[in-house]
Amino acid sequence: MIPKILHFTWKSEQLPRQMQAYYDAWRLLHPDWDIRLWTDETMRAFVAETYPTVIATYDAYPKMIQRADSFRYLVLGAMGGVYADLDVEPFQSIDGLLNYECFLGIEPLEHIFPDRHHQGVPFLLTNAFMGSVPGHKLWQGIIARMPDLVDQETFYSTGPSMVTASVLRLQKEDRPTLLSPMVWSPLLADGRKTRSDAEAIALLEPIGTVVPATSGSLVSHVWMTTWVPWHKRGNRFAPILQVPTAIKWAWRQMINPAVAKVVISDPLQLYTNQVIVATEERPQVQVAVRLGKRDLSTALAAALANLDYPRDRLTFAVHISADAHRGDVAAMLERSGLQAEIVGGDFASSAARDNAILDGFAADRDYLLLVDGAVTSIPADAIQRMLGAGLPVTTVNVVDETGAPGDDQLFRYEKAAPFKVLYKDGGRDGVVRRNKVFRTYLGHQKVFALLPLDGVGESFVLIARAVVDAGVRFAETPYKLHLGAEAFGIMARDKGFEAGGLTNLKVVRQRSI
């Protein structure tokens, strides 16, 4: 049973007038509860005393909102109870929630923007109103993962997206009870009443137990969002103020019809399964190493030789474009103990070379693993973990020697890819310019285990036979304003095949080669 402790946080004990009114209402409705107002000073002292191994991470967050967020999980993990933002207005006693092991609220679906759909998880679970018994598995997982997420943007390091991903990483039986929007947040950020309650319940019921508002709303989040600059906060007048901008973009669409008709599809499935387990199946895999004019490096040869996959289920082919170094490649293969066919061929573009590899995909193989010659490090269990994702096109978090994204063609459009994004990225010239400001990479949202992709890159990608047989190819001429590996995932999705990447499976690729 959840203990009767109410936790609130603020920078000091001096509260703004509206927050003070809500705080007083909480105390009036819960006279027998232990009600605690934590300040910036007392929060840090608590973390230092209770979690001495976490205090360095706590201090390392660049923003105070991240420390305030993380404190919520730390205090609930240690003491249990209920946490509420100070802009959550109570309407009645919440004693009925104490019977749950853990609970979280579902954010109104009206708040879910296109980026959430394009991310494959079109909902958010809140960190503004939540409670649990001490030591719940949700907080254990979050606390263990916190040090690795310090470099992430707030939503993905400590905020609602991190909470949502952490819930999805739990087995279903361990997940918290979910409160429908009408239970805890009947109002939207702009003050209107949510009308998405039934839709939210239907969407989240496969995720966990959802509690509807059968006895009216318990509380109401009024979305003061004090940590967001005032000009970025939601308000009902925003659509009116944006009319001139809307007219401008409508005109640009009219005079750029080729770009206006381009649709970059959202994922074909929900990415609600974030419990990715290496498969026990061992299908036949053809490994194609694209060297081009490079030599086969000692590091790559060793990584391929160390793959923990039955050798009778693997075949290797090394593709070169200059016969001058065929002997050196053969010698490296012999030293590493790899049996591989060396295939020569000169092509006008990397896309043409990759398509030749797809065209030569052996009929008795189930999957093709395309490996770039600049790769230097591969986890031994990479293939079975990629197969465990259960997708027809799967890639991994390709990083360079510094840990930064190592493949510019391995990405997802951050805000989906509406006309405005494609236009700004140069699509009016027939092909996008790959502006990184519009893109997100697997390492940027690594709290999720699996995420959808638009561009799958060509560094390390596993492709099912059905995808190849359906004619999905690397674009030698622009496909929906994209070329090469950038277009492969977009084309695959258009033909009914989902493409995604494992954020926590890292392959190192040298940019300098």
Image (cartoon, rainbow, N blue to C red):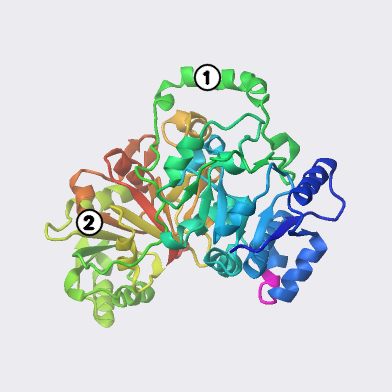
- Res 310 visible: yes
**Three-letter amino acid code at disc 1?**
Ala
Residue 388 left/right relative to 440: left
Figure quadrant of residue 373: bottom left
- Which circle's residue, 2 or 1, is located before the other in the chain? 1
> Disc 1 designates what residue?
250
If the image is split into quadrants, where does the C terminus sit? Answer: bottom left
Q: Is residue 439 above or below residue 11?
A: above
- Where residue 281 appears, x then y in whole percent? 23, 67
Residue at 69% x, 36% y is: 233
**Residue 204 magenta-drawn?**
no
Q: Residue at x 80, y 65 (%)?
A: 42
Label 2 crowd (10 A; few <14 / some 14-19 / many >=20): few
Part of the protein shown in magenta: 52-57
Given the current orientation, which residue lies at the most extreme right position?
14
User: Measuring 62% from the left and 67% from the top, which residue is drawn there?
Assistant: 77
Q: Which mark is residue 345?
A: 2
Relative horizontal placement of residue 75, taking residue 381 as reference (left or right): right
Name the amino acid type tagged 2: Gly
Q: Position of residue 376 (x, y in %)?
A: 40, 70
Please tell me whether mark 1 sits on a helix, a strand or a loop: helix
The residue that appears at 59% across and 38% down in the rendered structure is 216
